[in-house]
Image (spheres, helix red, strand yellow):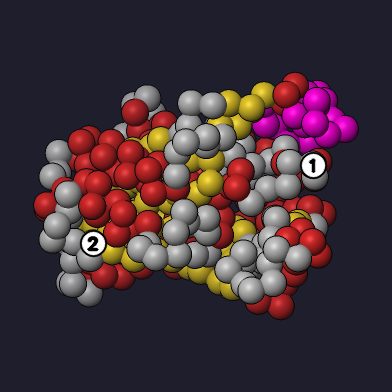
């Protein structure tokens, strides 16, 4: 059995922050940001919580799939920015969508999180434990960004994306995931759930810190490698893949990865210009956008690939 995507959903806050607005806070400008990242704006939560965004995306996915909350067997939420430690975001979603029969839990693999959750869902389905699983990626990155740090504040936004998986016979399902803990110090954010976090030095550590150059090198190396790993598993060539849905972190990263893979950039959908890096939400938001525009058709071969803190990276090859 394979988990086939029956429906997608997404939610982003109404509040947008344009590049010109950031130029009033840090030493930057619209042209500089666009040239180096491809980002024009990002959506930033004001009243919305991570749980609220996740629930809104879940509702949209269920509505499109024609499935009621009570028919969901399991809820998985990938997030590194929950609004509460407990209850977990998945339980908050379960309450909001009235999925009374569904257990749920969160997992954290940062920007790779959605793919780790998607692969977990596939494993449950293939094991025969659950038939209908709601997989959500949701993050409020604006809560952990230092808005005076030009190197990070220009990159991130908030949002949530969701897919409904239903067990079906046939289809493609190939997966790979990796972690490299010794490289974790290039992208960090300390917890505020410590007794000394309010001390000035400790408080500064609770914001996101990134060695941009090292993350770039890691991303442009790891994405082509995991694509090659998936193609080898499936005994396919890159020409057999219709689209590559990569984590929406930086336009330059996607362009560099496409060049190494040897595929036309037109096969790499992008929407980071509108949303920035929404961490675990970026791939499902992009999937939902393309799905609702009718740009994906049954039988399309897709590779989803993400990378992020940990360091972690993951990829899945599937049939739409």
Residue at image mark 2: 74
Q: In x, y percent, where is residue 40?
A: 67, 26
Image position of 161 with respect to 189: above or below = above
In which quadrant of the rendered view does residue 295 lie?
Answer: top left
Which residue sits at x=60%, y=58%? 307
Q: Nearer the viewer, residue 311 or 256?
A: 311
Q: In the drawing, does residue 299 fall left or right of residue 29?
A: left
Q: In x, y percent, where is residue 208?
A: 70, 55
In the image, is residue 35 part of the stretch drawn in magenta?
yes
Q: Secondary structure at mark 2?
A: strand
Quarter of the image containing the C terminus?
top left
Magenta stretch bounds? 22-40
Which residue sits at x=23%, y=65%? 103
Q: CA distance from mark 1 to mark 2?
A: 40 Å
Q: Earlier in the sequence, mark 1 or mark 2?
A: 2
In which quadrant of the rendered view does residue 265 lie?
Answer: top right
Q: Nearer the viewer, residue 116 or 172?
A: 116
Image position of 82 with respect to 8: above or below = below
Which residue sits at x=69%, y=72%? 196
Question: Dot 1 surroundings within 10 Å: few (below 14), some, or many (20 or more)?
Answer: few
Question: Dot 2 surroundings within 10 Å: few (below 14), some, or many (20 or more)?
Answer: many
Residue at image mark 1: 148
**Mark drawn on residue 33:** none
Q: Nearer the viewer, residue 266 or 125?
A: 125
Which residue sits at x=22%, y=46%? 97
In which quadrant of the rendered view does residue 100 lie?
Answer: bottom left
Q: In x, y percent, where is residue 195?
A: 64, 74
In the image, is residue 203 part of the stretch drawn in magenta?
no
Q: In x, y percent, where is residue 81?
A: 52, 55
- Considering every residue shown, the one lying at the far bottom of the view is 182
């Amino acid at each position: 059995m394979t988990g086939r995507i029956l429906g997608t959903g997404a939610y982003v806050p109404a509040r947008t922050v344009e590049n010109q607005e950031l130029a009033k806070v840090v030493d930057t400008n619209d042209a500089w940001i666009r040239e180096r990242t491809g980002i024009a704006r990002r959506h930033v939560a004001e009243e919305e919580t991570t749980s609220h965004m996740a629930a809104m995306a879940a509702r949209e996915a269920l509505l499109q799939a024609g499935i009621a909350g009570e028919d969901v067997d399991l809820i998985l939420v990938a997030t590194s920015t929950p609004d509460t430690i407990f209850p977990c975001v998945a339980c908050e979603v379960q309450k909001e969508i009235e999925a009374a029969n569904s257990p749920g839990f969160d997992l954290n693999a940062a920007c790779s999180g959605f793919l780790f959750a998607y692969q977990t869902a596939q494993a449950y389905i293939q094991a025969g434990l659950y038939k209908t699983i709601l997989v959500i990626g949701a993050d409020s990155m604006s809560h952990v960004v230092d808005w005076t740090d030009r190197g990070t504040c220009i990159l991130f936004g908030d949002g949530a994306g969701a897919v409904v998986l239903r067990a079906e016979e046939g289809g493609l399902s190939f997966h790979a995931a990796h972690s490299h803990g010794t490289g974790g110090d290039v992208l960090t954010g300390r917890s505020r759930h410590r007794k000394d976090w309010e001390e000035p030095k400790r408080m500064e550590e609770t914001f996101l810190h990134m060695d941009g150059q090292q993350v770039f090198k890691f991303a442009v190396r790891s994405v082509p490698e995991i694509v090659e790993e998936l193609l080898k598993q499936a005994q396919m060539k890159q020409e057999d893949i219709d689209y590559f849905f990569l984590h929406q972190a930086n336009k330059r990263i996607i362009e560099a990865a496409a060049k190494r893979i040897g595929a036309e950039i037109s096969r790499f959908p992008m929407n980071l210009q509108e949303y920035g890096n929404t961490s675990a939400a970026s791939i499902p938001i992009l999937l939902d956008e393309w799905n609702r525009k009718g740009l994906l058709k049954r039988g399309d071969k897709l590779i989803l690939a993400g990378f992020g803190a940990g360091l972690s990276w993951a990829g899945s090859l599937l049939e739409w």
